[in-house]
Image: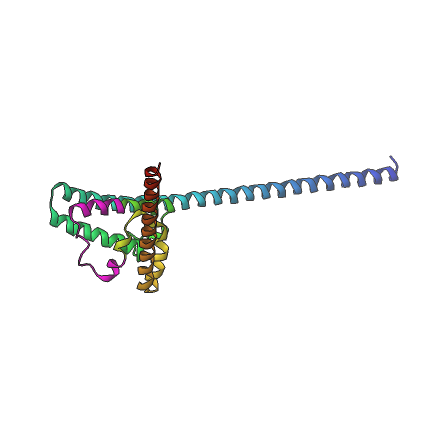
Amino acid sequence: MSNKAKLYLLISSLEVLSLTGCNKDSSIKESTIIESSNEETTMESTTNIEETTIVIDKDSEIKEFFDNEYNNIKESINNIDKEAIKTKAKNTFITFVDFVFYDKEINGITYDELTDDMKKQLYNDFCTMDDMICKVVPDYKENISNKYNVVKGFIKPKYYSIVNKIKEAIGDDNLDTIKELYEDDKERLSDLYEKGKQKIKNKYESFRNK
């Protein structure tokens, strides 16, 4: 083989080796990127699952707490023990108001950390309990301090939608705003009542004139 042929063969071999090396290096880099991406996705998924689990646990813990409170009150009602009903119901009312309106923690959990569904369920459940207690001991919320007295009129399911407005007014120590929220609702209900009466009256007159 001539020297020229040998030189050509050597150059060709080097080019092949060079190309093979680049492809191998590129393959390693691509593999590393894919593995890194998979690790990040897995970590993100795990984090989301952990956060969701924590939220669910908080909902469950608060629900269990108030379920126990309600069961204790029901037991007193079944035993027709009015003094026990008063004491337990008043304490539960104060705990509920502190938790919902004054951001006091229960077992290290705040009201704002609950899901919206649990907040609504908690409010409706307490309103149901309050209604049941009032049928047995209507004055159980008497003789409470002003911070609880200002919100006791809002313990009805229809007021759940303005809980945040009430909390803002409380935070600003603006009792006038709280009264306005309550009076506005009374006025709105009064208007609906008057419109209802007028509607019935119109129907009656229409029927009478036939």
Whether residue 103 can be seen here? no
Query: Residue at the location (25% across, 46% down)?
Result: 66
Q: Does the magenta stretch include residue 155?
A: no
Query: Residue at the location (15% across, 52% down)?
Result: 87
Q: In this view, does 71 lie to the left or right of 120?
A: left
Q: In this view, does 181 lie to the left or right of 129?
A: right
Q: Is the magenta stretch mostly helix, strand or loop?
A: helix
Residue 178, percent across and down? 32, 60
Which residue is the extreme one toward the front?
Answer: 209
Residues 177 and 95: in front is 177
Query: Residue at the location (14% across, 40% down)?
Result: 78
- Residue 150 in the image: above or below residue 208: below
Q: Is residue 209 left or right of residue 17?
A: left
Rendering quarter of residue 68 = top left
**The C terminus, quarter of image:** top left
Q: What stretch is highlighted in magenta?
A: 126-150
Q: How many labels does the image show?
A: 0
Residue 158, percent across and down? 33, 48
Q: Does the magenta stretch include residue 145?
A: yes
Residues 7 and 92: in front is 92
Residue 106, percent across and down? 28, 52
Q: Is residue 21 left or right of residue 108?
A: right
